[in-house]
């Protein structure tokens, strides 16, 4: 089995993860899927299947999650449902066969801009539908979008996939716990990774923790390993690694080579299991979404809206 990484073919290593951890990775799928959005005119409050977009059974099942206020088709044969769940507007997706509900951020594959965030912003700025469930709900007006999905108290067991990320070798900024850390898998030679590093500086300065997990996904593994291993050996070299400083390259030890293989294997397995895609992208981020209680996988980290979704506005 081969996987593609930014136009290059990389053979999967023999490193294997515990089955329970791989199963937990399925929770990453929603945010990792990239969907193109297509706008259509639809009712602002949905009370029945007047649009023939979905079955009555699906509507009944979705209504168990919360109050449905809007349903609109998207490319990829998906439906985007704007809903009031636990008093807050949220956007979730369903597949054409009505067998799967997907949560998380959706992206335009051409621009990698978020297409689900504008739907949610519109719902929040326009006010929530009339509250028929007795749950406190926004009453309208200009409501600031401030997801801060990684922020919040967590007193439950750490999900296996987050524990596994915490054990992977990398350079950690800050000293937050595993469930309060954003994990970014990257290749130090990747320009998009450089953009993500610069975009996250203000969040690190505010006290958020980020663990950078290096790989050699861009190919030329021997060349990339010398730079990536420098980060493993001395995390203080992270910034210099992003500038591809030739003065910090090292000859990786067998232990460092193994660690890099494990990092590649993790991202490969997470992507394939979560999205079904053989194309592995860097940078890719993982974190525990405190709003849903599920591990989440996302890309587009140089997009400010994605970082605000994770950390909130600062």
Image: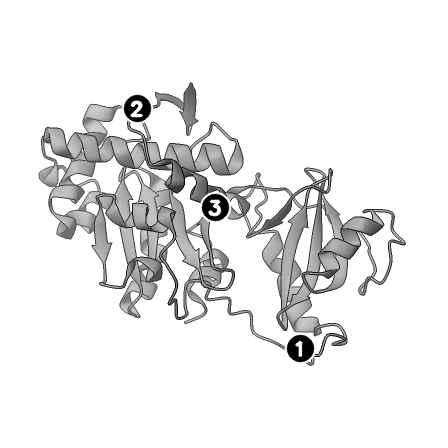
Looking at the image, which residue is at 21% across and 50% down? 171
Mark 1 to mark 3 CA distance (whole Å): 28 Å
- Does the CB distance between marks 1 and 3 fall below 8 Å? no
The answer to which of marks 1 and 2 sits earlier in the sequence is 2
Q: Position of residue 132 (x, y in %)?
A: 76, 75
- The colour scheme is one colour
> Is residue 266 left or right of 147 when viewed as pictured?
left
Q: What kind of element bears circle 1? A: loop
Asked which quadrant contains residue 158, the reply is: bottom left
Looking at the image, which residue is at 26% across and 23% down? 220
Residue of label 2: 13
Looking at the image, which residue is at 20% across and 37% down? 228
Q: Quadrant of the N terminus?
A: top left
Mark 1 to mark 2 CA distance (whole Å): 50 Å
Q: Dot 1: within a 10 Å radius of its alpha carbon, few (fewer than 14), some, or many (20 or more) residues? A: few
Residue of label 1: 135
Asked which quadrant contains residue 190, the reply is: top left
Residue 178 visible at all: yes
> Is residue 130 left or right of 283 when viewed as pictured?
right
Q: Nearer the viewer, residue 34 or 246?
A: 34
Q: Position of residue 72 (x, y in %)?
A: 76, 52
Residue 194 visible at all: no
Residue of label 3: 28
Against 13, residue 264 (above or below) is below
Q: Nearer the viewer, residue 27 or 126?
A: 27
Residue 182 numbered mark, or none: none
């Amino acid at each position: 089995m081969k996987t593609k990484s930014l136009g290059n073919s990389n053979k999967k290593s023999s490193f294997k993860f515990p089955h329970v951890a791989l199963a937990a990775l399925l929770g990453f799928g929603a945010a990792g899927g990239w969907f193109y959005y297509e706008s259509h005119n639809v009712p602002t409050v949905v009370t029945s299947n007047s649009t023939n977009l979905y079955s009555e059974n699906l509507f009944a099942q979705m209504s168990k999650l919360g109050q449905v206020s809007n349903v609109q088709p998207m490319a990829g044969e998906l439906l985007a449902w704007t809903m009031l769940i636990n008093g807050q507007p949220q956007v979730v997706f369903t597949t054409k066969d009505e067998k799967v509900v997907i949560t998380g951020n959706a992206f335009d594959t051409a621009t990698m801009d978020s297409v689900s965030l504008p739907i949610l912003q519109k719902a929040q700025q326009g006010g929530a539908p009339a509250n028929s469930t007795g749950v406190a709900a926004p009453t309208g007006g200009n409501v600031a979008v401030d997801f801060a999905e990684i922020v919040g108290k967590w007193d439950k067991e750490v999900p296996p996939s987050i524990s596994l990320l915490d054990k992977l070798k990398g350079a950690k900024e800050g000293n937050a716990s595993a469930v309060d850390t954003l994990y970014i898998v990257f290749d130090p030679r990747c320009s998009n990774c450089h953009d993500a590093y610069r975009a996250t500086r203000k969040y690190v300065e505010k006290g958020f923790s980020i663990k950078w997990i290096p790989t050699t996904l861009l190919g030329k593994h021997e060349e990339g390993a010398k730079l990536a291993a420098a980060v493993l050996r001395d995390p203080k070299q992270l910034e210099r690694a992003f500038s591809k400083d030739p003065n910090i390259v090292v000859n990786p030890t067998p232990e460092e080579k193994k660690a890099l293989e494990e990092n590649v294997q993790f991202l490969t397995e997470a992507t394939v299991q979560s999205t079904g895609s053989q194309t592995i992208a860097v940078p890719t981020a993982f974190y525990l979404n405190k709003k849903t209680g599920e591990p989440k996988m996302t890309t587009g980290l140089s997009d400010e809206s994605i970082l605000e979704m994770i950390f909130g506005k600062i």
